Amino acid sequence: MKRTSKRNGSPCQRDDDSQDAETQICLGASLPEDVWCHIHSLMSMRAAARAACVSRAFLHSWRRHPNLIFNNRTLGLDRNTYGANESARGFSSKVDHILKKHSGIGVKKLKIHMPLDYKLKDSCYPDSWLQFAVTLGIEELELALPVKAKYNFPYSFFCNGSGDSIRYLLLADCSFHPTSEVGSLRSLTRLHLCAVSITEDEIGCFISNCYALEQLEIRYCDWIVCLRVPCMLQRLSYLEVLGCSKLRVIDNKAPNISSFYFGGNPKVQLSLGETLKMKNLYMSFSGAIRYVRFELPSSMPNLETVTIYSSREMVDTPMLHGKYLHLKNLSIALNAAASYDYLSLVSFFDACPSLETFVLDASHWKTEHVSIFTYPSDLRRMQEQHHHRIKNVKILNFSSAKSLVELACHVVEHMTSLECLTLETYQSTFRCHVPNHKFIKCSPLAIDILREAKRALMAIRTYIEPKVPSTVELHVVEPCSRCHAVELELPSLG
């Protein structure tokens, strides 16, 4: 009973352990101290803290743990157990306790993600944690605060060479107003700003001193109107700009960007500079499909991977002569208007002679597409052009929409190298059979969605399956028959 009570103590708060001498010899003296420290560095912070309860040797190596990651989960602050208020109050005290007991040796990562309901009344806590990071020469620093924390990240943190050791910096939900006094951050290779109050001049001033920067990620920073990326960022290869509501211009002068991710206002003026090295592209806005097909082939001919998300696609994809000669992977997700013609996506197949994988997420269940069973007629056929490289095609949220069935038929008839075709009807958001998920039952689906799933299955069996060559593997994924057994008995064409 005595031993059990010891183990029930908080592993992060434990400061002493009264193991007997024999245990100390077995656990601590058999291996050098540096070896134990290395072993514990490979463990998660919470696992290493629990191990510290076993012996003084483990406690010593715990105090030199290189990766300090603080959130409710790692600190054992379960909201369901402690309640939201108690969980938030315990966060600061636990973080303070651990940092004060740490030896200050060998720390590489400091990640602090405060609870969303944490009420930051003053800046003393984060200020002291940042001072700890400066003193130790942290390489990776993350500071994510509650949404309405109103914390001003001290730009002096980077003055006089204080931030020279930092390679990765993430700031979320705070203000950051650097000035010209900030010196060169010679080691910073990745910068991630999320919901940070910073102006275009301030961010321009800051990144101009980050000559080693390789990745720049800016999300939901609503003060930025014009983002200018200077030409001196020769190593910058990844640029991501998402959800900046007031952004109107992206002016990039960095010459070696190979991956560009953009999501937001479709009216943003994109001036990306040298784009011949662009390999990976992500676009997310209304009309993105037409934009990628119509605007970009001539300026980004060397793309290899493209992901497109269009929240509203009103116009069919145009048939044009521009080509992406090296594109191998294409993923499209769209919520199309009822009149959208999915068969027009064949334009991408013609434009991408090296395409090997095509994924389409046709999330359109809220719109009234014309079902192939509403007006049965002969299927349309595109011109007799075969595609000799495409091996894998997957269509998610497959329905009985006539143009979608026609697209699937085009795939099986004209893709001579096709090896696998997957057609997945509407699925529950949470599924009972997904590995590592503990859902006993799939989340419910509306009756009209299940009816459409049945129509989709009938369309597959009637129009597509008979045309699939014997060399092609056809995978049809339908709603879980165990969780939706009653609903699936409903008439399919009613």
Image (cartoon, rainbow, N blue to C red):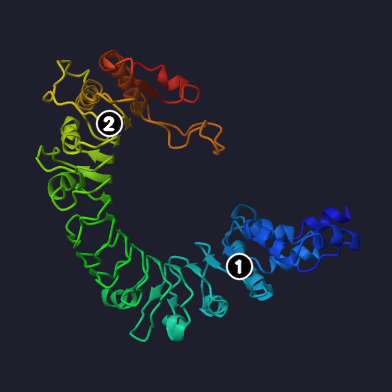
**Rendering quarter of residue 383:** top left
Q: Secondary structure at mark 1?
A: helix
Q: Is residue 64 above or below residue 281?
A: below
Image position of 90 with respect to 121: above or below: above
Labels 2, 1: front one: 2
Q: Which amino acid type corresponds to the residue marked 2 in the rendered image?
A: Ile
Which picture quadrant has residue 271? bottom left
Labels 2 and 1 touching (C-beta < 8 A): no
Instruction: Say which residue appears at 69% left-offset and 61% top-offset.
Output: 49
Under circle 2, the secondary element is loop
Q: Amino acid at mark 1?
A: Arg
On the image, the x and y values in percent for residue 428 come to 43, 33
Q: Which residue is at the front of the view, 294 or 57? A: 57
Q: Residues within 10 Å of mark 2 (few under 14, many from 20)?
A: many
Q: Which mark is residue 89?
A: 1
Residue 362 vs 231, above or below: the answer is above
Q: Position of residue 254 (x, y in %)?
A: 25, 67
Q: Nearer the viewer, residue 230 or 180?
A: 230
Q: Which mark is residue 390?
A: 2
Q: Is residue 423 visible?
A: yes
336 left or right, relative to 209: left
Can residue 494 be seen at all in this image of the molecule? Answer: no
**How far, Cα to Cα, is label 2 from label 1?**
56 Å
User: At 28% from the left edge and 40% from the top edge, which residue is drawn?
Assistant: 328
| In-front residue for pair 127/232 | 232
Instruction: State which tag comes first along the sequence, 2 or 1.
Output: 1
Number of marks in the rendered image: 2
Residue drawn at point x = 66 percent, y = 61 percent: 38
Q: Quadrant of the C terminus?
A: top left
**Residue 366 location in percent, x, y?**
28, 35
Please rate how many residues cluster around mark 1, counting C-alpha atoms within 10 Å: few if below 14, some from 14 to 19, many from 20.
Answer: some
